[in-house]
Amino acid sequence: MKKTSLLVLIIATFMTTASAHADDSALALIKKAGVLKIGTTGDYKPFSYKSPNGELTGADISMAQELAASLSVEPEFVPTTWKTLLEDFKAKKFDVLVGGITVDAARAEVGDFSVPNVKDGKRPIARCEDQTKYSSIDAINQPSTRVIVNPGGTNDKFAHEHFTDAKIAVFPDNRVIFDEIAANRADVMVTDGVEVDLQSKLHPGVLCPTKVTEPFTHFENAYLVRKDPALKAAVDDFVRKQLDDGGWKAKLDAAMK
């Protein structure tokens, strides 16, 4: 075989292989199916929340719907939980995970995070009469304190790492967990600052942010997507546009009411 013929054969084989890989990419498969599968817990206002009639609402739900439209596909929401979301993601039950997802190393090992749309930190929320009582980790970490957490997420992890002397109750329903504090069945919860602010608005005069000098942690929220450079680029482009033109802020402001 002549060298030129061999070179043509090598190039053709390379292009065929590259094309096959491109056709098998996550983004290509999503577009071929015409559906973007979106994982979400549906229990975390203001990002993702399932109302009593079963309708999903929230800032990240609106974002996910528009993300699907930007890819010219239909959104399909797949329920998951904070305890199982990582295993569900590994099992490829959905293409993207949304709903106040904190960027962390364990999640980054199995997927790609988009550019962040939230910068936040964990803060405590308690009954308003206890605003000054739970003003530090040490103040909370007392044998008489009843800390409450939702199972499986970063709140659960934070509580068990820092409140070794306090009583920790794991409450399964994040949609009504704050009612436990209001009813004096728990004393304090440490969660994302945006949730503290929202729940204070939803329980005026009953629940308040505690008087901390600064958040206990600093972190970012983003969307976790299947590992695929093309899919990550598409999601990043969408999120950046929403951040730049005020679309994300408008959605978050609306969900905070």
Image: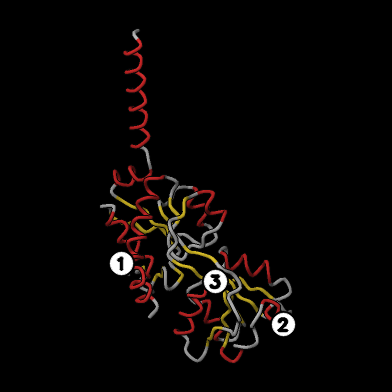
The single residue placed furthest to the top in the displayed view is 1
Q: Closer to the camera: disc 2 or disc 1? A: 1
Comes first in the chain, label 2 or label 1: 2
Would residue 251 appear left or right of 147 to someone viewing this image?
left
Figure check: 116 above or below 166: above
On residue 144, the disc is 2
The residue depicted at 57 percent of the width and 87 percent of the height is 127
The single residue placed furthest to the front in the displayed view is 4
Residue at mark 1? 245
Q: Position of residue 79 (x, y in %)?
A: 43, 60
Alpha carbons under labels 3 and 1: distance apart: 25 Å
Q: Are marks 2 and 1 in contact (CB under 8 Å)?
A: no
Three-letter code, disc 1: Asp
Q: Position of residue 191 (x, y in %)?
A: 55, 73
Three-letter code, disc 2: Ser
The quarter in which the C terminus is drawn is bottom left
Three-letter code, disc 3: Gly
Alpha carbons under labels 2 and 3: distance apart: 25 Å
* Secondary structure found at label 1: helix
Q: Closer to the camera: disc 3 or disc 1? A: 1
The quarter in which the N terminus is drawn is top left
Residue at mark 3? 121
Q: How is the image coloured?
A: secondary structure
Q: Position of residue 168 (x, y in %)?
A: 66, 73
Q: Position of residue 224 (x, y in %)?
A: 45, 55
